[in-house]
Image (cartoon, coloured by chain):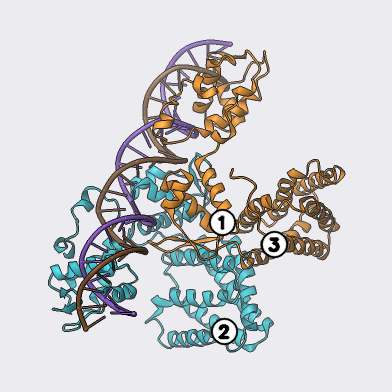
Chain colours: A orange, B cyan, C brown, D purple
Amino acid sequence: MAALATTRTWLHAWLLMSKRDTVFKEAYNASLGMLKVGVVLPSEAELGRRLGISRTTVRSILDAQVAVGLIAWNRRHKEVLRPPEPEDYFPADETDTVSSMVERAFLQRILSADAQPGSQLNESDFAREVGVSTSAVREFLIRFSRFGLIEKQRNRHWVLNGFTEAFALELFEVREMFELRSARAFVRLPRDNPAWAALDAIEAEHRDFLGQPGARMRAFPDLDDRFHRLIHGASHNRFVTDFYDVISLIFHFHYQWSKADELDRNATALREHLDYIGGLRSGHELDAEFYCRKHLASARLTLLRAIKGPNVPPPDGT
Amino acid sequence: MAALATTRTWLHAWLLMSKRDTVFKEAYNASLGMLKVGVVLPSEAELGRRLGISRTTVRSILDAQVAVGLIAWNRRHKEVLRPPEPEDYFPADETDTVSSMVERAFLQRILSADAQPGSQLNESDFAREVGVSTSAVREFLIRFSRFGLIEKQRNRHWVLNGFTEAFALELFEVREMFELRSARAFVRLPRDNPAWAALDAIEAEHRDFLGQPGARMRAFPDLDDRFHRLIHGASHNRFVTDFYDVISLIFHFHYQWSKADELDRNATALREHLDYIGGLRSGHELDAEFYCRKHLASARLTLLRAIKGPNVPPPDGT
DNA sequence: GCTACGTCTTTTATCGTTATAAGACTGCGG
DNA sequence: CCGCAGTCTTATAACGATAAAAGACGTAGC
């Protein structure tokens, strides 16, 4: 495993975990994709830009890759010596930040059936359960509280409001308000606005998806997300775009567990999206509004059915 | 000073401040109001309920009040011995939680002129400046980020978005959407809904205010807040009501500094509120909508003028 | 003279620790 | 037997500390 070979103080990681080196590991894995034998790597700064990290971390990665014989590195010259093997990659669970671990554990708990509305949550208990410090849990809960699913009383415990039908209805009420306004704004965008080109691209992706049923369906949530975010972008309102984070989160996690009629649902959504796109293109706000309303109504119905139906917990604990 | 006389480990507070005893001090001050010579105090649990604190803190307070000779306490019997003097009160700055200190310092910075949009904020710098730990600052910033005025890049610094005209316009766009919907919902409330009685009470308060110009004007922001929150309550939507927190925060802090034509502004708002209330009572959604729109438009104008005008910093550092 | 690297400093993410505050349990007493 | 107080345990709100990661500065080399 790569970690054993690095010159980093990996031993410390097991004695006192002050900060996980997830940035290093994730970027290390990403950089392996660039390694083709004989290739000469660009400057440290350029690598940092491509990987989205600082030069400090780039240098750590290069050091580590020298240590396992992947590259030769002498000042400006960095040459790839051998192609990366599967063993060169850090396992996925080590590239996860603490906060994302907390997030996953928490969502699993709150979006599953056993989270009765009104039940209370204990910071230290939960921290022990997940295996992180209370501060990490605390910061997550504060961050998460903006989604309206939890609340806190000063000096007291957190209260889970529960992912109830009422929550879903309130969520969709606001979603409809915001998306209708965004759709109308979208229709009014001048034809040379880059959003139209982006819409063309997304429409093409939709048609691709319809062409190969089942094959790439797993990737639909991502497409869905990008489609709606594109529309919301036309509102030029940070509160509107920020609100989509709530929706996105809910959908992302909730639908992970209700795989039942996934293909059907997605196919319906794809077709509704295409109608919706047509409405936007028509230039008539009322048309756009009509198809927008239609799609949102069916999305709401799907979500409500999922909430009311037998709430299946996630397949496994990860 | 009361702290010196208490049996609590007050010395530690100066060596290692792990948690400020603001709950104790605030409740101590509040409880002094109940002390009339000869009165026999209720049970510990009852005192806790009245003061909004736990029995543990109640007992600390009673201990402290025995120590300074305010009361005699023997098991169930607690009798007031002497009336509280001004020196018995803890000074106001000691009843402030760390988080509220951070909040005040931060708002002063971000809502004043010198917060250029795009400038970056440093957790440790800011913590040093305010004199609290980085964790306290961190948690505050996370909590505050939901207001859309700051953002954070993973592993990097915070970015101040600035309290700009664009921010105000986006804020009001959403405010209008939400408040119009809430106002319409309010009109449709059945006449026996308690909200109508609350509206009556608030209307009476408005008339009182108009009667005594200037005198109680300082208290107007509070009335304004309660009025709008009452209306938003009719929406029965947590996202709508939560959003009013943003508005409330902005108004509260921004208007602290623009005292210029405060009386005029408030008088105008009072009259607009009364029209608005009339609209709600009329039973016609369109009437309510008309006066709601009118009031919000004038509120927006006032805020925009304040942003564009000479941005006066707060009078003093507190 | 600009780009890239070596070195050093600063900041962030996360941890563990502690005094305060909440809350649970138990037994007394009217 | 119910409410109240005595006692004990646990949780929260702060803190400081540390390794990872970012970033700043100076200098070497093309």
**What type is the residue that disc 2 sits on?**
Ile
Give the residue number, with chain letter if any, for mark 2. Answer: B277
Relative to residue A93, is residue B185 depicted above or below?
below
Q: For the residue carrying disc 2, how many other residues have a C-alpha within 10 Å: few (<14), some (14-19), or many (20+)?
A: many
In the rendered structure, which disc, 3 or 1, sits on the residue that comes first in sequence?
A: 1
Distance (Cα) linking label 2 and label 3: 43 Å
**For this rendering, which residue is in front, D25 or A297?**
A297
Q: Which mark is residue A253?
A: none
Give the residue number, with chain letter if any, for mark 3. Answer: A309
Disc 2 secondary structure class: helix
Q: For the residue carrying disc 3, how many other residues have a C-alpha within 10 Å: few (<14), some (14-19), or many (20+)?
A: few
Residue at 21%, 70% in the rendered image: B62
**For this rendering, which residue is in front, C4 or B53?**
B53
Disc 1 secondary structure class: helix
On the question of residue B217 being in view, the answer is: yes
Q: Are marks 3 and 1 on the same chain?
A: yes
> Which quarter of the rendering shows the C terminus of chain A?
top right
**What type is the residue that disc 3 sits on?**
Gly
Q: Count the numbered circles shown.
A: 3
